[in-house]
Amino acid sequence: MIDSKKLIPISIVTGFLGSGKTTLLNQLLSSPELADTAVLINEFGEIGLDHLLVNSVDEDIILLESGCVCCSVRDDFSSSLLMLHDKRAERVIPPFQRVILETTGIADPIAIFEFILADKEISRRYICKEILTVVDAVYGQTNLDRHLEAVKQVSVADHIIISKTDLCDKTLLENMEERLHKLNPLALRSYSGIKPANPDILSGNCSEVLNLAGKQLLRQNTHSEEAILSSHDHRFATFSLAWSDAVDWDDFVAWLEALLIVRGDSIHRVKGLLNVNGESQPVVIQGVQHSFYPPVKLDRWPESNVETKLVFITSDFSKQAAIKSLENILTVSVC
């Protein structure tokens, strides 16, 4: 069994065309805290690195003044990751501790996420830590209205960075925040404008990210179903399932796997805390469509609130359908 703590975490940075991914990357790469970072981008010309360039290792790798390694993905994503890992092992490049992968503006980050989990050679070396989505505070509403890709990028995010906050007024920003919360109430949120994005958004390990996500769920009011049910954005909807009965882990996994096989394309995110038989601590699970992060235990349950809570972000898949599938395998009283 592979020790996940020894794997190099990958953060996928996505966002619609013109959202500010390039600006965010430049801010992060200039931070001393992220000097041990490798960056995968499609073409060097897509990001302004001239002022950071130190020298070229080979045709596809350059070293930056900050200490970061920058690699151009010209053809094969898998080959680029393996090549970086080999050069790291051979000490041709600095021993980077994390990877940032920038997607194109209309890319589906789920395909990359699932590829990292499915490719045996990659999964022996790397682990997908999180999906960060950059949203333009000025034109984000228009992009969400017109482009399904932009909506999907937001709906699958672990962390949303609102960019260009210095270029919009307070009302516009508040409207943007409200819409993002309705579309993805599970995501953490940061801001990028005149003040650079905090490098801490990339500095944690996978367990810390999941712990933070689990604590966020604990802070939400499980019984505030009206707020959950109203969280929708055109083609997407959010709902929660909760029950107090402890579940058998194998039975729960059997239900979830069956559900994702049949309806995975419609389930963009699912995140939750589980009350598992034989466990005194809550277990955090979260997944993206057909794939799941490894489960993580939190330190404690909230007082007087030991129950399972799952939150779904879906399209064309209702709460009633989820309950029906659940009742076919688990004996629980869902609310």
Image (cartoon, rainbow, N blue to C red):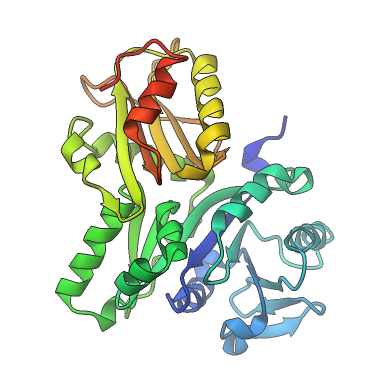
Q: Nearer the viewer, residue 160 or 30?
A: 160
Q: Is residue 192 visible?
A: no
Q: Is residue 69 above or below residue 121?
A: below
Q: Nearer the viewer, residue 21 or 138?
A: 138
Q: Quadrant location of residue 36?
A: bottom right
Please give left or right for residue 106 compared with residue 182 in the image. right
Q: Is residue 3 above or below residue 131?
A: above
What x and y, as percent, mark residue 173? 22, 70
Quadrant of the image for the N terminus? top right
Please give left or right for residue 184 compared with residue 158 in the image. left
Q: How many marks?
A: 0
Q: Nearer the viewer, residue 321 or 86?
A: 321
What x and y, as percent, mark residue 223? 19, 30
Quadrant of the image for the C terminus? top left
What x and y, as percent, mark residue 229? 23, 41
Residue at (54%, 65%) from the top-left corner? Answer: 34
Q: Nearer the viewer, residue 118 or 147?
A: 147
Q: Is residue 318 above or below residue 76?
A: above
Q: Find the residue positioned furthest to the bottom.
A: 50
Residue at (48%, 51%) from the top-left corner? Answer: 204
Residue at (67%, 73%) from the top-left corner? Answer: 70
What x and y, as percent, mark residue 141? 30, 70
Residue at (55%, 59%) from the top-left corner? Answer: 108
Please give left or right for residue 322 compared with residue 99 in the image. left
Q: Is residue 222 visible?
A: yes
Q: Find the residue positioned furthest to the right.
A: 90
